[in-house]
Amino acid sequence: MKRIYFDRILVDPEIMIGKPVFKGTRIPVYIVLDLIGDGISYNEIIKIYPDLTVEDINASVKFASLILDRREFHETA
């Protein structure tokens, strides 16, 4: 089943084995989140992936927040 989040992120089992990607691309959301985590600026990310916009990158952060809000994390001993 296809799902679209924030009008920009697509989850489709037929594309990239169901990993979330930016709509209209095969760019996985996790790659952009990794770049943000590494301190890469939005402008640099857009230079690397010119098909993306600032709105796409913002949607990836919102998507990550949505996913984390719905999961429980437990400490392991």
Image (cartoon, rainbow, N blue to C red):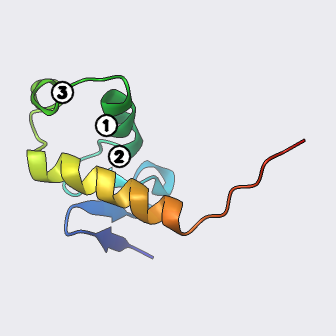
Answer with left or right where residue 9 lies relative to residue 72: left
Circle 1 is placed at which residue position?
32
Marking on residue 63: none
Task: Tell me residue 16's x, y (percent).
Answer: 43, 48
Within 10 angstroms of label 2, few (less than 14), some, or many (20 or more) residues? many
Task: Tell me residue 20's x, y (percent).
Answer: 40, 55
The mark nearer the N terminus, 3 or 2, is 2
Vertical order, 34 against 3 (above or below): above
- Quarter holding residue 65: bottom left
Asked if residue 51 shows in the view, the reply is yes
For badge 2, the amino acid type reads: Val
Vertical order, 39 against 67 (above or below): above
Circle 2 is placed at which residue position?
29
Within 10 angstroms of label 3, few (less than 14), some, or many (20 or more) residues? few
Answer with left or right where residue 46 lies relative to residue 61: left
The one of 67 and 75 positioned closer to us in this rendering: 75
- Quarter holding residue 73: bottom right
Q: Residue at x 35, y 46 (%)?
A: 29
| Secondary structure under the numbered disc 3 in the rendered image | loop
Nearest to viewer (mark 3 / mark 1): 3
Circle 3/circle 1 CB separation < 8 Å: no
Circle 3 is placed at which residue position?
41
Asked if residue 22 shows in the view, the reply is no
Nearest to viewer (mark 3 / mark 2): 3
Task: Tell me residue 21's x, y (percent).
Answer: 33, 51
For badge 1, the amino acid type reads: Val
Answer with left or right where residue 76 lies relative to residue 64: right
Distance from Cα at disc 2 to Cα at disc 1 = 5 Å
Q: Which residue is drawn at 9% across and 33% down?
A: 50
Q: Quadrant of the C terminus?
A: top right
